[in-house]
Amino acid sequence: MLHGEKLSIRVLNQKLAPQTLSDIGMDERACQVVRNVMSKESGMIVLCGPTGSGKSTTLYAMLREIDFYKRNVITIEDPVEYVLPGAGQIEVNPKADITFAKALRSILRQDPDVICVGEIRDEETASIALKAAQTGHLVLATLHSSSNNASLVRLLDLGISPLLMASGLDLLISQRLIRRLCNHCKQPARLSDAQTKAFEKRNIPISNIYEAVGCSKCNDTGYKGRIGVYDIMPIDNASKNRISTGNISVISNESDDQQMKTNLHRQAMKHVISGITSIDEAKRVTSG
């Protein structure tokens, strides 16, 4: 690299236990949808989003919903980020020929009830995971994609059969992270007349709306910490029929992508009116 090396460090605080679904930003409706699927004996939940969007944190929050002493839980991770007492955790190590696909094949012989796949990267892993979801296993996994519909297209691109996708998938969750306002320096937002009227029309107290300032506690950024916003897509019978066509233009269309942005924006605005984040931050994250 020209002009010296560059280093990116990811710090994991091992003292922090995995958070609950509500702690990471899911509203009650989304929590209930997730819990309903996770109460099933089989099926597959796929979390999607760009790098650094909090997918691993959401996975751990979902695993917290499970009683490890009643259900045999095995995870495959790269790397193992937090120790989960009562769960079997396998760390991927390509040098030792331990890949996601090979580890997944191996643990299926250990009679797991719940399988957590840190990331689906290839056709083999995706195929095994979807087939496991059809044979009495609950599978949780992540996929690098920009939206729920993009996840379906990505699986097709990997070579997964549309029928296998339709029969195996139960829930898709697209997510983003927005920054929390610093509680030490946030101040009531200076709203435009149009913004004030919009909030008053919906009976939302403008005294709950804050904006970023910056102080020594937040390194003058105005923000400290992050929280998630989610677009929840249950795979109902209508969705399964759409997926089974294998037609990308049917599976992924502009109206659905626009609906995802609307859903994410709606979730972000809930955090705005709760005083958790700012209007500018909600726009920044959900307008792209």
Image (cartoon, rainbow, N blue to C red):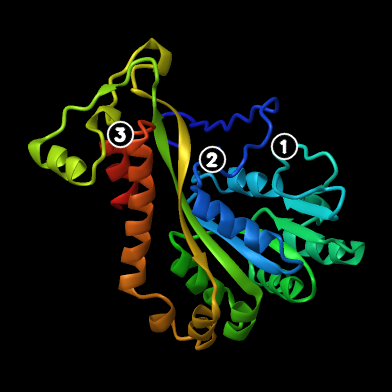
Vertical position of residue 3 compared to residue 197: above or below:
above
In this rendering, the answer to whether 180 lies above or below 113 is above
The kind of residue tagged 3 is Ser
- Residue 171 in sight: yes
Q: Nearer the viewer, residue 249 or 157?
A: 249
Q: Given this view, does label 2 or label 1 mark the residue nearer the observer?
A: 2
The amino acid type found where label 2 is placed reads Ile
Q: Residues within 10 Å of mark 3 (few under 14, many from 20)?
A: many
Is there any visible trace of residue 143 in the rendered image? no
Please identify the residue farthest to the bottom as the structure is shown.
245
Q: Distance from label 3 to label 2 (Cα)?
A: 17 Å
Of mark 3 and mark 2, the one earlier in the sequence is 2
Which residue is identified by label 2? 24
* Gap between marks 2 and 1 measured at Cα: 16 Å
Q: Position of residue 251 (x, y in %)?
A: 44, 79
Image spot of residue 200 (x, y percent): 18, 40
User: What residue is rendered at 85% in x and 55% in y?
Assistant: 72
Q: Nearer the viewer, residue 91 or 251?
A: 251
- Decide: is 273 above or below 73: above
Q: Quadrant of residue 47?
A: bottom right
Chain-order first, disc 2 or disc 1 = 2
Residue, disc 1 = 82
Neighbor class of circle 2 (other Cα within 10 Å; few <14, some 14-19, many 20+) is some
Question: Which of the marked residues, 1 or 3, is nearer the chain's N terminus?
Answer: 1
The residue type indicated by label 1 comes to Tyr
Disc marking residue 278: 3
Residue 142 x, y percent position in the rendering: 60, 57
Query: Which residue is depicted at the point 52% across and 86% down?
Result: 241
- Apparent side of residue 249 relative to residue 125 in the rendered image (left or right): left
